[in-house]
Amino acid sequence: MGIFLKKAGRNDFLILEKAADIGGTWRDNNYPGAACDVPSHMYSFSFEQNPDWSRFYSGQAEILAYMKGCANKYGLLPHFRGNSELLDARWDESEGRWHLATGDGQQYTARIVVSGIGGLSRPALPNVKGLDKFKGALFHSAQWNHDYDLAGKRVAVIGTGASAIQFVPQIAPQVDKLVLFQRTPPWLVPKPDGLINDGVKKLFRFIPASQRLFRASIYWQAEGFALGFVNPKLMVAIEKLARWHLARQVKDPELRAKLTPNYTIGCKRVLFSNNYYPALTRDNVDVIAAGVKEVRANSVVDANGVVHKVDAIICGTGFDVADPLGPLKIRGRDGLEVREKSQGMSAYLGTTLKDLPNLFMLLGPNTALGHNSIIFMIEQQIKYVIACLEEMDRRGAATIEVKPAAQDAYNDRIQAELQKMVWSEGGCKSWYIDENGRNFTIWPGFTWKYWMRMRSPDFRSFNFGKTA
Ligand code: NAP
């Protein structure tokens, strides 16, 4: 967002950041083996292609370095305020300004606020009886304790999602014993990863069109995957691949049975890994599919009552997606807090919200993906925000606010579509769906459709307020 503001000649902005440094996901998720399961040439900005990616699926350190490089190159650092967690945002109708208060005691006013807080920034520990009584080391994958030496320890891992399947193969050879608590097995397919040789890097550097072509081929292959989301019957081929992968890597029929999901592939995020299943076949790894009953001072008790003595518990248990705002209070035109008013999360195109003038969101409700690069979605949103700012200038408007009817009609439409898709039909329980069965996270299907919607905003969906 900062880069696009600068490109548009808008330099009067600040970037408030909760942590000391930039990097978000790729700063916090630095657990062993952290990498992106979207190919790097697609998981990068369209306007800042990097011919030097070392592999097809880059690791956390390389992605973080790329992001920091972009922030530096485009001159964002002078706009950056670290250790500035936004705690309160209040719209003042008479002034036509947002009043913002941050955790370090600073106050700001702004005409426009763009939220880039995302939905996966607040680690969630499992709600397990006795977890607070545990005497050993306890940490979450997104808050990895690098000072704790795992060598020779007995370690429990809770969770088998996208994060756990990356760190389990890394720590399994180090520890004395790894007890993996799996609640629901993920569907897993091979990861077509590998180092990129110098010849290819040179080609991408000297003929940038070749890299753009490669990026486009990744994009459209991923879009092909979305066919299965729209029509779950088409997932059969991917399911065959996943079953073949499991059968090839896990010979023990008992372990294989434990690792075989009983829901339609795609209902939860499909995971990519070549080393997860082999790690689980190691002699020092036990997969407990019974679930966690309770945690005691030095052990974890599974649902069958078996006590597993451990020195450490690592939680790969995901994020608090139901309450992404955390301590942040946002109060709009009527002074009421957003959280109190909203019955389930929804927005207009995942970007603007009714009753909240001059506020935009990046990665708001129903913009997450299970099949393609989220950077692509963010870029479409950013261009949309810039187009809205330009339209405000053109009209001489002080405010922009989505019409409630436009937001409601949009949500009714996408919710009707989502009801027929794999996340609702696939027979699983996932964090994509809220307690009322509403999918508040995922964009329904093809990202090119989102792209088309976002290319030119329909300004009839907005109320513009004149300058006072
Ligand atoms: P996640 O996908 O939400 O997985 C959490 C895991 O913890 C699940 O296996 C869940 O089981 C389990 N769990 C949660 N509470 C539990 C409890 N009380 N008892 C037992 N098990 C429990 O979290 P994540 O792996 O951190 O990934 C979060 C998201 O981050 C992903 O969906 C993805 O969007 C993103 N991510 C992306 C990448 C990438 O390469 N692009 C890598 C890592 C993460 P259930 O399945 O039964 O709920």
Image (tube, helix red, strand yellow):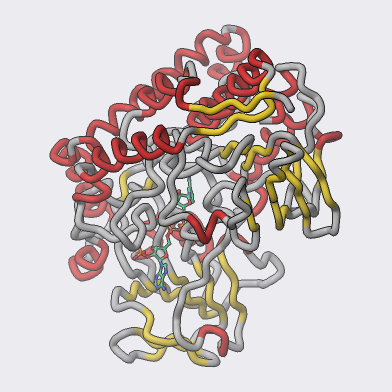
Residue 259, placed above or below residue 199: below
Taking the image as shown, residue 206 lies to the left or right of residue 468, namely left
Q: Position of residue 75 (x, y in %)?
A: 81, 27
Q: Quadrant of ligand 1?
A: bottom left
Would you say residue 198 is visible in this rendering? no
Residue 411, placed above or below residue 8: below
Q: Position of residue 104 (x, y in %)?
A: 83, 58
Taking the image as shown, residue 214 lies to the left or right of residue 148, namely left
For the N terminus, the quadrant is: top right
Taking the image as shown, residue 351 lies to the left or right of residue 230, namely right
For the C terminus, the quadrant is: top right
- Residue 420 vs residue 171, the one in the foreground: 420
Residue 145, placed above or below residue 333: below
- Residue 261 vs residue 75, the one in the foreground: 75
* Residue at the (38%, 43%) spot, across then down: 442
Would you say residue 240 is visible in this rendering? yes
* Residue at the (29%, 61%) spot, across then down: 429
Q: Position of residue 320 (x, y in %)?
A: 51, 61
* Residue at the (43%, 46%) spot, across then down: 346
- Residue 82 vs residue 337, the one in the foreground: 337
* Residue at the (48%, 57%) spot, across then down: 321
- How many labels sit on residues? 0
Occupied quadrant, residue 87 = bottom right
Q: Position of residue 371 (x, y in %)?
A: 37, 37
- Residue 322 vs residue 148, the one in the foreground: 322
Taking the image as shown, residue 29 lies to the left or right of residue 127, namely right
Occupied quadrant, residue 165 = bottom left
Residue 428, placed above or below residue 350: below
